[in-house]
Image: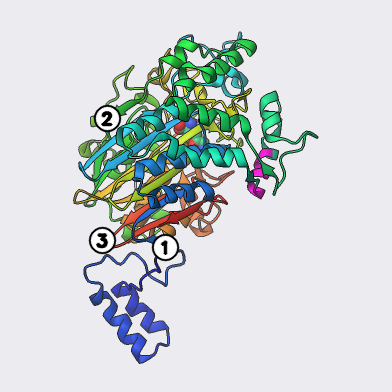
Amino acid sequence: MVMPIIMSIKPKRALRRIKRARVSGAALLLMLLAPLLNANQPAIIDYTDRFHPVVSESGMVVSQEALASRIGADILAQGGNAIDAAVATGFALAVTLPQAGNIGGGGFMMIYLAGEKRTLAVDYREMAPLAAHRDLFLGDDGEVDKNKARYSRYSAGVPGTVAGLLHALNSYGTMSLQDVLKPAIKLADQGIRVTRSLSFSFARAEQRLKKSPASTAYYFLKDGSPLPEGHLWKQSDLANTLKKIANTNGEDFYQGSIAKKIVAQMQEHGGLISAEDLAAYKVVEREAVTGSYRGYEIAAMPPPSSGGVHLVQMLNILEGWDLKASGHNSADYLHRLIESMRRAYADRSEYLGDPDFNPVPVAELTDKSYAKKLRDGINLQRATASSAVKPGLTLPEESPQTTHFSVWDKHGNVVSNTYTLNFSYGSGIAVAGAGFLLNNEMDDFSAKLGVPNAYGLVGGAANAIEPRKRPLSSMTPVIVFKEGNPVLTTGSPGGSSIINTVLQTILNVVDFDMNIAEAAAQPRIHHQWLPDQVFYEEDINVDTRKRLEAMGHVLKSSSRVIGRTQTISRDERFIYGANDTRWPGGAAAGL
Ligand code: DON
């Protein structure tokens, strides 16, 4: 049951409020006493805050789609743990959020096991097929063939989602695969009502989806129009695929009839994924990247994600300044952020890639003394120009989609999962007869050294295409601890801006004392070294923008919102959930 938010007043705010409000004597007494009454409880919720999280005593699931969040919460209510709920939510999103929820993509799951006090990272990122090679996406002219990299059967890496979710469930869950898959199968079989935003999103992706006959059949009416709002959308092929996964513990996907369908698709239309590739797909458990920030401990996704490394690196740089004194989203604060982002993303382009192929200098990049060196090089009055800027690079107009969900159970187990098809609907190509879309994650590799990918990210040899390699990612599922106990988890979609979105969410909570719903709702900025531009959300104050320009920054309004977080926090008594409202349809579902 969702609990009412307790009245909890931060002392300084109580005084401020007394000054400006007319309050009765009894209320005044209560307001003054409240901090003392709640002395043992961190005062996370304040009724004067503009945004409020959902509150629960016994469990929380936050995802970008309400039905999927509810399914996860129901699994917790049945006695499942956070891992059971996460796997159920992950499969449900594959049905209800086809843009990003998936079984044809890949991702990362951070898990905290309360019983063992252990954090681990499950890497189920897609792998390049065996036949892939460094110049796969270069045309005869030696230039990158963007269409081949992003919208063809060559765009797809070997999917890892099914193996990843099953690995998590089999290793750390408590329920059977049949039970956690049941709700997703039911939704696919019986149908869901198409929401306005889903119908809009089909229409937006129409051109791309219609290149694939299977996608056309799955996401459009017979007359060719996108499935309309209110339409009862049944996905029988997907339901059958999910049933086969349930009945064979995933084997059918990697070695059986579903694998055959994927391979047939490749053979018919040109594409590299073979039966051997699918059979050889491997989930890897990795150690989290760790760091500390103002008394909190951070555990985040290690390579092949760049997220954890650069999150910790930027926090290390920023720790040397009193950010609160600058004021939230002030020019002085944002300048420090931008300069930290610029340096971290420059390192990303050079050093980061799949650690199974090239060693990544994680310890060096996350070292506090390296951060001090970088901080000391930052001019606090002027923007530093990004070196070797190539003109004309911009973030894509393409609507990208990845999706994050967070789960917290009553035992204190935590799951932070980000998974993706890369773009919205991935390559746009569905596997005929199997009901799901293939990713276009191969574009996350550096198709040509120094040439930007869809997110404007440039990369080097460390992220060149090689058989069986995993493309570098920015996905940043993270768990934040205080004195060894988890206090917050978050993550976001947003391509290259994910790391900066997660960074700003943590700063909003730790430095600016915001509750997680407030922290999610603040306008954000993004800088990634190249292009040398600060992308900003329009709500960043005009005066602040002018000051930043006067300091030498080049500002560009973001063509889209910057990230969308799904956050859970916990204090001694309650669990709080907040879904970022930048995207419609998500929900925090508490028990
Ligand atoms: O792994 C990555 O970094 C990208 N493929 C993520 C794509 C993404 O976040 C698109 N979403 N909004």
Between 478 and 266, the one lying in front of the other is: 266
> Magenta segment, which residues?
195-202
Figure quadrant of residue 144: top right
- Name which residue lies at 78% across and 33% down: 222
Which is nearer the N-term, disc 1 or disc 3? 1
Which amino acid lies under the numbered mark 1 shown in the image of this protein?
A: Val
**Gap between marks 3 and 2 measured at Cα:** 33 Å
Q: Residue furthest bottom?
A: 25
**Gap between marks 1 and 3 measured at Cα:** 16 Å
Label 2 element class:
helix
- Name which residue lies at 55% across and 36% down: 395
Which amino acid lies under the numbered mark 2 shown in the image of this protein?
A: Val
Instruction: State left or right for residue 56 relative to residue 253.
Output: left
Marking on residue 362: 2
Label 3 element class:
loop
- Name which residue lies at 50% across and 42% down: 183
Between 174 and 438, the one lying in front of the other is: 174
Marking on residue 2: 1
**Residue 97: in sight, yes or no?**
no
- Name which residue lies at 64% across and 11% down: 268
Closer to viewer: mark 3 or mark 2: 3
Q: Give the image location of residue 135, x and y in percent.
A: 51, 11
Label 3 packing within 10 angstroms: few (<14), some (14-19), many (20+): few
Residue bearing the label numbered 3: 572
